[in-house]
Image (tube, rainbow, N blue to C red):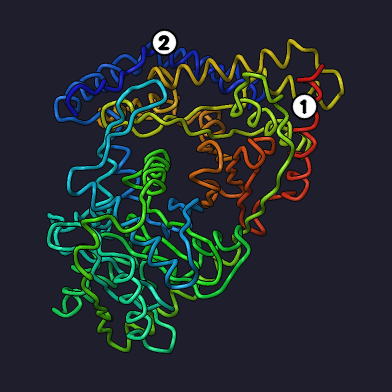
Amino acid sequence: MVGMTPLPVPPLRQSLDRYLAAVRPLVTEAQVRHTEAVVAEFAATDGPACQAALERRAASETSRGESWLSVGWLEGYLATRESLPLSSNVAFHLALSAPGAGVARAAAIIRRIAAVHLAHLRGELAGEVTGRGDAVDPRQRAVLAGGLRHPRPGRDETQAGRPGVADREVGVLWRGHLVMIPIADGAGHPFPAAAVERSLVRAMQEAPVQSGTFTHLSYLGSEAASQHLSALLQDARNAATYRRLRDALFLVNLRPEAAEPAQALRSVAFELDQAWAYKPLTYQVGLADDHVSVHVEHSLVDGGTLHALVAQMQTVGGDDERGVRTAGAVGADLLEWVTPPEQRERLAAQVQAYRAEAATMRVQVLRAPNPIPADARISGDAVAQATLTYAQLATYGRVRSAYEAVDMREYLAGRTECLRPVTTEAVALARGLLEQEAPEHLLTATLEAHKQRVIACKRGQSFERHLLGLRWAADELGLTPALFSDPSYAALTTDFLSTTSLGREDPIVRFVFAPTSPGGIGVNYTPHADGGRQVEFCLIHRDGEAQQVARFAEAIQEGTAAIAAALRA
C-alpha cells in the first residue's frame, strides 16, 4: 500500500548473533559450541549469497506491494496438508452482545457483524492505526468480502467472492445443514434485525430434521478434501452450490444448546458441523446462552486484524435509518451436495477418523492473580512469559522453545514476527525462584531481555523470520547449509509452547488453536476481569501426547505467585 514501510531485511551478522543467543538456554554447552562453529561456517560460505538473494527478493516483492516474507508465508499456509482445524485454524470467543434472547438476539448480532463486513465493501470502514498512530496495512480486511480457500492437490489456492456489495447473502449452519439468507439491500446496507430474524426462522424450518453433513469434507486435510470437491464439482448443481458458498459474506452457525464457555469454544475450534473450515470467517451464536465466537481460517488474516474488526462491531448500534427504510427481504434457500453413494461412504470413513483425532483435543482454563502491581508500568507479556518459563522448569526440570507472536501489520504486507521468549535471563530467574533465591537483578534482567526482543521485532530486526527467508533463499540457490539441519535449529523452531495474546478480554475473550508440534501445548494468556487484576491462561493440548499438563497448570499458578512476591520485594 502507498506509504507503508517495507519490511526490512536485517543484517546477516546481527541475526546470526541473535540466533545464537536464543539457542543458548535450550541446548547443552557442547551443542552451543557445535552450533557456534556451524554459524561461523555459514557466515563465511553460503550466508552472504543467501543474504544477497533475499535482499533481491525483498526489492522485487516491495515493488509489487508485497514483502520478502508475505508471499512465501502465504504459500506455507496453503501447502498445509493436515486438517485445518487441527493445524492452523483458530476459534475466538468474542465479546459481542445484543438485547433479547434466542433467535431475536442472534439476528441482532448477525446484523451487527454484517454491518462491518458491508461497510468495508462500501469503502466506509475506518482505517486501523497502531497505538503509536502508525497506519496498519488493510489488506487482511479482504476476508470481509467472503471468498474461501479452495483445497487443491499439493497446494491450495484462495478464491475471492463476487465483487460488489449489493444483495449479498450469508450462510446459516443449522444442525449440519447450510441455508442461505439475504443480508443486504441493493445499496449494500444490512437489512433490519427483524428481517434477519424472520429469515433465520425460515432457515431453521427449511433445514431437514435429521443432522446434516454439509461441512464434513472441509474438516479433512486438503488432499482428501480436494479429491471430494473435484468429484462433486463435476455436477453443475454442486458447482452452483459451491459458488454461493464462496460468495457468501460469511457463515454463521446457530448453536441450540447452552455450554460452558471454554468448552463451547473447544467445540467451535475442533468439532464437526461448526464451520466450513476453508471459509475465512464462520461465526457462531448461541441460542440458549450468550456465547458468540468465530472459527477463522488463518492463511489470510491474523488475530490483530480480527481484534480491530470486532471492536468495530461493538460500536454498531441498532437498525440505522438506511436499514429501516424497507422491511427487508426475507428468504431461506437450502443448499445440499449431490453425492454418489460410494463417495458418501468414503467420506464417512474419513470423517470418522477426523472425529477420533478431534476427540483428543483438550482445553483447560485457569486464572491467577495478576502479579503486576496495579500502578506498575511492567509488560504483561514479559511477566506471562517468565511465568511460563518457570512452569516449564518446575514441571519438566528443563526448558524447551516457546513461540510468542508479535503483530507486524504496520509494515507493507505485514503479518507476524516470532519472538523467542525463553531467554537465558528468564531461565536464570526461574531457577532462582525455584530455589527461593531470586535477586532483584534477575527479574530486572528478564524483563529487559524480553523488552529488547520486542523492540527488535517491531523494528523488523528480529532473526526468526529472517532465518526462514535465508532458508528459502538457500533452497532457490540449490544450497544446503548445515545451519538448517543443525539440531539446535530444530530445538529452537519446534514450539513446545505456542503462545499468543491480544491483550485484555474485550473484544476478544480468549482463543483456542491446536498446538503446533507433537506433545506441545498451545497457550493463550489474557489479563482478565477486575481491571486486569487476574490473568487467564487457556491451555490446549492433545490427550496422550502432551505430558504432565495438570502439573504444568499448577506450576503456572505457583509461578505467578513467586513473581508477584519478587515484584513486591
Between 212 and 100, the one nearer to me in the picture: 100
Q: Which mark is residue 163?
A: none
Question: Mark 2 highlights which residue?
Answer: 13
Question: Mark 1 highlights which residue?
Answer: 564
Q: Position of residue 283 (x, y in %)?
A: 40, 60
Mark 1, secondary structure of its residue: helix
Identify the image quadrant of the C terminus. top right
Mark 2, secondary structure of its residue: helix
Between 285 and 20, the one nearer to me in the picture: 285
Does 382 sit left or right of 334 as displayed?
right
Residue that appears at 29% across and 73% down:
228
Does 224 sit left or right of 211 as displayed?
left
Identify the image quadrant of the N terminus. top left
Q: Position of residue 113 (x, y in %)?
A: 35, 55
Between 551 and 495, the one nearer to me in the picture: 551
Marks 1 and 2: in contact by CB < 8 Å? no
Q: What amino acid is labelled 1 in the image?
A: Ala
Q: Earlier in the sequence, mark 2 or mark 1?
A: 2
Q: Position of residue 328 (x, y in %)?
A: 22, 70
- Closer to viewer: mark 2 or mark 1: 1
Label 2: few (<14), some or many (≥20) within 10 Å?
some
Residue 400 falls in which quadrant of the image?
top right
Picture layout, residue 524 above or below residue 3: below
Total residue callouts: 2
Residue that appears at 68% across and 31% down:
389
Q: Position of residue 118 (x, y in %)?
A: 23, 53
